[in-house]
């Protein structure tokens, strides 16, 4: 019985360290929340999921964004596409993200005055001309595919998000798992010691 319990504990401890880091490598735009009519820096995180270099990127700027300015990125040329006076898309070309690596691209802009959602649709081009379109609604079955994936969403509200508490929780999650694992191990050792102390002494 004790051995069975220990085996289950070992499985739990292993899962607590393995499950959390697992995540699909998507093109993601952050932050996930922002305040209305506020100058905000957005970061597009781009992983390379293939065995060849990423050579081009395009990000569609959600309607309602004002005064959008991409940050200069060494090794890349930036093309700003406008619809009238509004920036509608940004293209990065001429650079490379090698296989197995990632890069971050930033831009700054003022969020809309109305609450709602910013849908960040991105397009990632590889050296062989293949384009992965991150433009599917996250809730649809078609969001995941060989050359497609879900777009990122930033929720715009009138009140600042409760980021400090969330950030603290995320930062300390690894430490919490370690503490939990050590506590479980200590409990197992205590039970084993108790079982041994209850065994009658050999005559």
Image (tube, grey):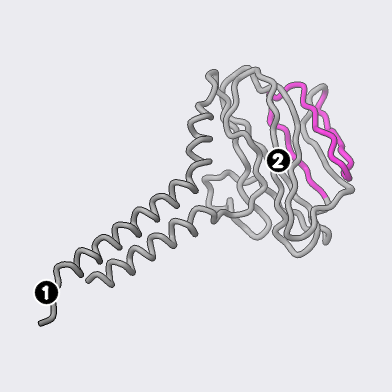
| Helix, strand or loop status at disc 2 | strand
- Asked whether, in this view, residue 113 is left or right of residue 141, the answer is right
Element on which disc 1 rests: loop
Q: Is residue 16 above or below residue 200?
A: above
- The residue singled out by tag 2 in the image is 44
As displayed, is residue 179 above or below residue 6?
above
Residue 135 to residue 195: above or below: above
Residue at point 65%, 17% (across, down)? 37
Circle 2 Cα neighbour tier, 10 Å, few/some/many (<14 / 14–19 / ≥20): some
- Nearest the viewer among 6 and 82 is 6
Q: Are marks 1 and 2 in contact (CB under 8 Å)?
A: no
Region in magenta:
56-84
Q: Quadrant of the C terminus?
A: bottom left
Q: Residue at x 68, y 41 (%)?
A: 121
**Residue 132 locus on image (x, y percent):** 71, 53
Q: Is residue 149 magenta?
A: no
Q: Could you tell me which residue is drawn at 80 percent across and 36 percent down? A: 90
The residue depicted at 63 percent of the width and 43 percent of the height is 151
The residue indicated by pointer 1 is: 200
Vertical order, 186 against 72 (above or below): below
Where is the N terminus found, in terms of image quarters?
Answer: bottom left
The residue carrying pointer 1 sits among few (fewer than 14), some (14 to 19) or many (20 or more) residues within 10 Å by Cα, namely few
Give the foreground label among 1 and 2. Answer: 1
- Total labels: the figure holds 2
- In percent of width and height, residue 78 lies at 86, 38
Between 136 and 16, the one lying in front of the other is 16
Direction from residue 141 to residue 178 in the image, left or right: left
Distance between mark 1 and mark 2 Cα atoms: 66 Å
């Amino acid at each position: 019985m004790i051995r069975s319990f220990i085996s289950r504990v070992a499985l739990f401890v292993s899962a607590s360290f393995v499950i959390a880091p697992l995540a699909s490598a998507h093109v993601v735009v952050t932050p996930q929340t922002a305040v209305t009519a506020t100058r905000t820096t957005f970061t597009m995180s781009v992983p390379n999921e293939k065995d060849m270099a990423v050579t081009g990127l395009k990000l569609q700027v959600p309607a309602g964004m004002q005064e959008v300015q991409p940050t200069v990125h060494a090794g890349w040329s930036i093309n700003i596409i406008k619809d009238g006076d509004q920036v509608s898309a940004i293209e990065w070309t001429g650079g490379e993200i090698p296989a197995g690596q990632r890069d971050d691209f930033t831009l700054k802009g003022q969020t809309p005055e109305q609450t709602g959602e910013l849908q960040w649709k991105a397009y990632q081009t590889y050296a062989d001309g293949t384009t992965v379109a991150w433009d599917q609604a996250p809730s649809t079955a078609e969001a995941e595919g060989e050359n497609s994936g879900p777009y990122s969403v930033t929720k715009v509200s009138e009140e600042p998000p409760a980021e400090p508490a969330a950030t603290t929780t995320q930062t300390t999650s690894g430490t919490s798992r370690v503490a939990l694992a050590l506590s479980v191990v200590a409990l197992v050792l205590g039970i084993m010691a108790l079982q041994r102390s209850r065994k009658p002494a050999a005559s």
